[in-house]
Image (spheres, rainbow, N blue to C red):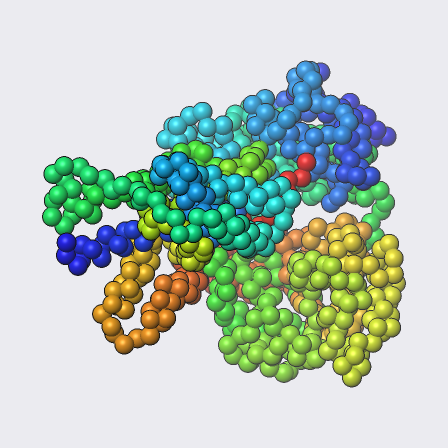
Amino acid sequence: MGLLEAIILSVIAASTPLLLAAAGELVVERSGVLNLGVEGMMIMGAACGFAGAWFTGSTFLGALCGIAAGAALSCVFALLTLGLAVNQVAAGLALTILGVGLSGLIGAGFVGEKISPAPNLYIPLLTSIPFIGRILFGQDLFVYFSVALVAAIWWFLYRTRAGLVLRAVGDSHTSAHALGYPVLKIRMFAVLFGGGCAGLGGAFLPLAYTPFFIPGMTAGRGWIALALVVFSSWLPGRLAAGAYLFGAVTILQLHAQAFGLGIPSQLMSSLPYLATVVVLVLISRARGTAGSAAPASLGMVFVPDR
Amino acid sequence: MHEASPPPGPQKEPLLQAIDITKRYGTFAANDSVSIDLFPAEIHALLGENGAGKSTLVKVMYGLVQPTLGELRWQGQKVVLAGPSQARELGIGMVFQHFSLFDNLTVAENVALGLDGKETFAAMSARLAQVSQDYGLPLDPKREVWRLSVGERQRIEIVRALMQNPKLLILDEPTAVLTPNEADQLFIVLNRLKSEGRALLYISHKLDEVKRLCDTATILRGGKKVATCNPKEETAASLARMMVGADIGEVKAGSARATTVPRLVVNSLSLAPDDPHGTHLQSVSIEVKGGEILGIAGVAGNGQDEFFAALSGERLSHAEGSVIIDGKSAGQLSITERRRLGAAFVPEERLGHGTAPRMKLSENALLTGHAASHMVNRGFVDKPATLATVDRTTKTFDVRKAKRDPEAASLSGGNLQKFIVGREILREPGVLVVSQPTWGVDAGAAAVIRQALLDLSGRGTAVLVISQDLDELAEIADRIAVMFHGHLSEPIEAALATREKLGLLMGGSSAGQSAGQKEASHAAGA
């Protein structure tokens, strides 16, 4: 296996959790809700996903546990922000703190345990094609699922009526309400979907990336996923591109460290986060000329008058 | 004499009857036992001041609000509307005052959202093109709404309602945002809908329109129905009396106000907008003399907000001399420094811009008066002085409030506006810039405010009024200029500024040209 092939394989692996979590958050934000709790839902997905897989011995059931954990945590968020009209930023931050703490508690007994990682696809002949074989036909199912998920979200948003309604709710909840659409219900489903995706993105880490659990193993990926949604201007295609770009930055800094460039490793490790900040600044500067891409009702509390 | 006179026309069965509708929010009754009958092939006006309960009543009819008491009958049958989609199924369409549109979606998508989704998007788009052509309401289905003018946006609302082929169409203040010409075009469409046998409910407080267009009028005041009448047999004054419940004092200008030297001068002011959907100010020049009221007309969103911000100092201009207050260059001075030069500003938005909603009136008085009104003593707030300002404003401008010093948000729109305008006038400014002084204010308060502006200019102040209300400008302004796409027209003497002339300028037909040039270009084109 050549170096380039190895790099591409590891980039894909590093990008997949970002893509899963960001795709879910994109749908949430398109419905007009800003859930800053992605990091908390991811780490809960990681802890519960590992626990599920450890008890059942099945990666698939583990992944389902991860999804359920993320969705359950997002339920708390939905109750607060949609049911009780709490400020979304505050509730999202609280959700992350809750998720990080709770996952440490749940995962405490599993630290040091090992499971067998998710198997990679193997198709005779195809997987053996030099270079592209492993990249295209030799990944684990999470990777294929994440790509299919983004394609499905694009199709949903732009080709179905339900997707149109979801975008409409995010653009103007007052208009949507005036036309008779159940704004809070639609947002509720979006938030749950986003929670499930974040949970799955988190579960990917102990189930496929590294076959063990350590507290705090998401290491800020939830925040990068949030930045990715802004980076993508809320467009699924750009989201995928952005996720792989950030995955590449993460991996390349590791390789750069291995080469011994004489740059402190701490500085190199901070590269993905620095890239996040730079991208956010560039995007907010570009917005002045390109018109606003954000859903117009993003982050605003809605209380229907009845 | 106006009570319960029978509706005109043959004895038809009413299409929709609202019977004794009452809607309470807590102890407040937005509608108190209101009954109204709507007939096919009839334009029925719903008249009333802001807060009279018009919007609540139509929301009940469209299923958006559930009545506390009372019932609706559709073609004689009792119905309970659980939501707008049920109202649409019956054949009730609605055009909202605050458009229920989605700025980042296309025209076709917006229309699709107002329908029930039983046809494919392609079939719907084709029908949209057909309907918009049939009624002479041209629309480009692929354009995003934020790119469209207000008139075009309203067309989407109307076409969307028409695509459901409604038997009853409700229009909530449809002309509030239109130029006079656009309004005329709308009336043609409405008359056609009437001739097709549809019932129309037309909400407005513009009496001339109602007299021109409507067959029947129901008048609400304070949530109660006061009369049903034929508006064509009434005078504007008698309709207004029913709406307000009292005669409205006429506004009078002081005798022979001497216009003196220019006190506010704007020199080729150009400014890029700070938000992507804003308007670019294009070399705006104007002079306002002491003792004069200059009106700025125009459809909202043509640069008035940017112009106000540049005058008040919320945004600085590039050249010092582009704004001159009493002979001093102020283009790059802050708001406070401009106030020290004797200028005062009243923005359009009462809550959040003109006042901090959750702060007391005395604190709000201090917010604009701290620099030049002796309410601060060596860095400490002189609380008695701020309260005295509130008391003076209250007394002079008849501000009605529950206690001496309530929160700004607790006042009604009209009373808060009287407070804000009064607060600035009592400082006896040399220059007053005021935007939409009576927007959403009841007729009584509007008369007080307009009179106060006239009196102020009579004392030698230069007053600049930005307003969308042509009637208001005709009443108080000495000269009127029109803003269109960031250009400001040459001012016209108010006596010569007919609605037609202003309407053309508001539609941009000769923006930036003087009357002579316009005639010349017409001659050249002919």
Viewer-nearest residue: B422 or B200: B422
Identify the residue at image location x=69%, y=57%: B351
Q: Is residue B136 visible?
A: no
Identify the residue at image location x=52%, y=44%: A74
Residue B91 pos. (x, y %): 57, 24
Residue B488 pos. (x, y %): 54, 64
Residue B42 pos. (x, y %): 65, 26
Count of marks, rendered view: 0
Q: Is residue B335 left or right of residue B412?
A: left
Identify the residue at image location x=23%, y=39%: A121
Q: Is residue B349 left or right of residue A288?
A: right
> Is residue A125 positioned above or below B275 on the image?
above
Viewer-nearest residue: B189 or A33: A33
Viewer-nearest residue: A143 or B417: A143
Q: Is residue A61 left or right of residue A190?
A: left
Image quadrant in which the N terminus of chain B is located: top right
Residue B246 figure quarter:
top right
Residue A118 figure quarter:
top left
